[in-house]
Image: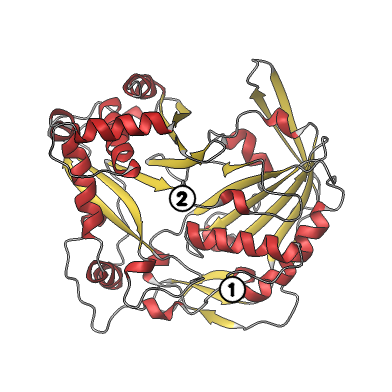
Amino acid sequence: MVAEIIEGSAIMEKSNGKVSQLGVKQGEPTLVCPADETEKGLYFLSNLDQNIAVVVRTIYCFKSYEKGNENAGEVIKDALRKVLVHYYPLAGRLTISSEGKLIVDCTGEGAVFVEAEANCKMEDIGDITKPDPDTLGKLVYNIPGAKNILEMPPLVAQVTKFQCGGFVLGLCMNHCMFDGIGAMEFVNSWGETARGLPLTIPPFSDRAILKARSPPKIEYLHQEFAEIEDKSSTDDLYKDEMVYRSFCFEPEKLEKLKKNAMEDGVLEKCTNFEALSAFVWRARTKALNMLSDQQTKLLFAVDGRPKFDPPLPKGYFGNGIVLTNSICQAGELQDKPFSHAVSLIQDAIKMVTYGYMRSAIDYFEVTRARPSLSSTLLITTWSRLPFHTTDFGWGEPVLSGPVALPEKEVILFLSHGKERKSINVLLGLPASSMKVFQEQMQI
């Protein structure tokens, strides 16, 4: 760990056009171990965990008019020690098992925790509804010199105090430890611990219930793993400067999209997710100027928790999501009616049955393949996650969201607005493509 104070600084353009400088002074990183003795040894990660071992960085902004931020770091750190007793694998380290798979060595050495101070007020950060790795990245601690995920602890936390009395909790967590639902249950449990409350949903830690079958049985095609040839040379476009934008879809806009999807009478019903996913898949395909015979793949996660037999236990601490897919030619996606794109997504959702999920687990066991992102759009939906319920004693977050998108192929759906009925679509595209995408967003 680095001994000296690290200065992070970034230029931000505020909504009023003025540019301000965010300077963050990070203190010495410390290791936070579980408050009590916890299980040691190797902790099994299922094949659904192996699939998505990417680092996810999120921030939660808190500000209370009743109390300042003086002891925020202390309260959050102390609660982390206690909550790690329940979530003890987060205090371990990732390693490779004798089978060549990711596994957690429960060493109990602890999560990394850093306290930091910003040189401005929280509102000076500007618009956090769009990913901004340069600015928001200052609010999450990066392990110096870490070359891969094995060199990064599963949980890294930074509490940054702002001059206005607010503070930001920045988290860096590995997706192999949990999916969005599991991560939210962990963060909410941490908040409950900080407020001296018992855990509403204690974690269910045994992931062996999702072990592969013996012998494995692959019963589906699993095109989510298919490598698609980039005939359209879209990779060349990505050499251009990346631009990040967020597009807000209010309930009226979402209704209009659903109406458009159903107007030709082909579909009986249509959800917000189905209509919006089809809409952005078509728009991005056009923006990337794909050739009409170019195959394009849409990947998205379906929550498998209720679909397993029996359903996964409440509080399952791990990935309960399964990736499903739809593949078609770019020309077909563009030229056929909007209802066709929506029906492709509906078919992909219907495909996820108990048999499909077990087959996906066994597929990885046999092939060790990871889903391919070539000529692919991966939609991640956080709009149903209760980000706003996290409370460490300073009330619910005034803002929360991702620091960056994990891959250039990812589009994120986040809930937005007072009643969380709007959906913010966050993405990054090469500058030339973003111009076309923006035009496509007019409905």
Residue designated by label 1: 202
Q: Position of residue 94 (x, y in %)?
A: 54, 68
- The answer to whether 379 appears left or right of 246 in the picture is left
Q: Quadrant of residue 231?
A: top left
Label number found at residue 20? none
At x 67%, y 25%, the residue is: 11
Residue designated by label 2: 384
Q: Nearer the viewer, residue 409 or 339?
A: 339
Q: Position of residue 181 (x, y in %)?
A: 49, 60
SS category of the residue bearing label 1: loop
Instruction: Tell me if mark 2 has few (under 14), some (14-19) or many (20+) residues whose alpha carbon lies within 10 angstroms of its own.
Output: few
Q: Quadrant of residue 236?
A: top left
Residue 370 seen in the figure: yes
Q: Position of residue 391 (x, y in %)?
A: 69, 54
Residue type highlighted by circle 2:
Arg
At x 63%, y 46%, the residue is: 59
Residue occupying the far top of the picture: 17
- For marks 2 and 1, the one nearer the N-term is 1
Residue type highlighted by circle 1:
Pro
